[in-house]
């Protein structure tokens, strides 16, 4: 049941990204990438292998979802790499999850533009992504704060208090 809910959540995020967020005009020219945020947060909770698999699958769907005006497989590669890196960092150093999310949200748009440039996409020139990159990173970080809080609570990043079972300690009565 969790898998079905996860797939529905990811598909909902992708439809929301394509139909609502991509059509909005944001100050600074960039906008949030909810699909990238979803990959980063799932990878943080699932680990390296889970993050890579989920990133690849989300990337394949993003590659075929209209409007797909980029090289096929570009987002599958980017999201797979980002999912693996975030998941591995979460496994190796769980206390640095916030730094991992920040670095991933900063590097992923540049990685996507770099891979597009390497694959010969004529729409990729470095001045265009660099103009939009700061605002895109700020929007992603603002939205990721809430998602990071949810994932860190679920994955056990914070120390939790143990519940004391009833009757564990004898009750002393004053006389």
Image (spheres, rainbow, N blue to C red):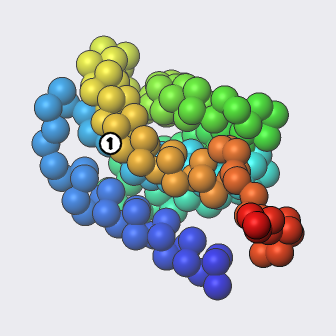
**Residue 114 x %, y %:** 51, 24
**Residue at the location (61% across, 30% down)?**
100
- Quadrant of the image occupied by residue 53: bottom right
Q: Is residue 167 left or right of residue 127?
A: right
- Quadrant of the image occupied by residue 86: top right
**Residue 156 x %, y %:** 70, 51
- Give the number of callouts: 1
Name of the residue lying farthest toward the front? 175
The answer to whether residue 122 is seen in the rendering is no
**Residue 141 x %, y %:** 39, 34
Name of the residue lying farthest toward the top? 127
Q: Is residue 88 left or right of residue 55?
A: right
**Is the residue marked by circle 1 packed among few (<14), some (14-19), or many (20+) residues within 10 Å?**
many
Q: Between residues 1 and 136, which one lies in front from this camera angle?
A: 1
**Residue at the location (46% across, 61% down)?**
64
Q: Judge whether 124 appears above or below 161 on screen.
A: above
Q: Judge whether 19 appears above or below 59 on screen.
A: below
Q: Judge whether 50 appears above or below 110 on screen.
A: below
The answer to whether residue 19 is seen in the rendering is yes
Q: Between residues 63 and 22, which one lies in front from this camera angle?
A: 22
**Residue 36 x %, y %:** 48, 46
Q: Pointer 1: what residue? A: 32
Tell me the element at label 1.
loop
Q: Which quarter shows the N terminus?
A: bottom right
Q: Is residue 119 left or right of residue 135?
A: right
């Amino acid at each position: 049941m969790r898998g079905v809910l996860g797939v529905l959540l990811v598909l909902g995020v992708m439809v929301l990204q394509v139909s609502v967020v991509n059509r909005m005009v944001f100050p600074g020219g960039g906008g949030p990438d909810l699909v990238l945020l979803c990959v980063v947060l799932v990878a943080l909770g699932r680990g390296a292998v889970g993050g890579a698999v989920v990133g690849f699958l989300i990337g394949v769907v993003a590659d075929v979802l209209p409007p797909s005006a980029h090289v096929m497989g570009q987002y599958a590669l980017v999201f797979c790499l980002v999912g693996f890196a975030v998941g591995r960092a979460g496994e190796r150093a769980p206390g640095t999850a916030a730094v991992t999310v920040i670095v991933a949200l900063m590097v992923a748009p540049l990685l996507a533009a770099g891979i597009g440039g390497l694959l010969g996409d004529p729409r990729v020139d470095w001045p265009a992504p660099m103009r939009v990159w700061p605002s895109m990173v700020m929007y992603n970080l603002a939205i990721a704060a809430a998602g990071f809080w949810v994932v860190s609570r679920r994955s056990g990043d914070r120390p939790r208090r143990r519940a004391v079972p009833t009757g564990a300690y004898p009750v002393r009565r004053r006389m």
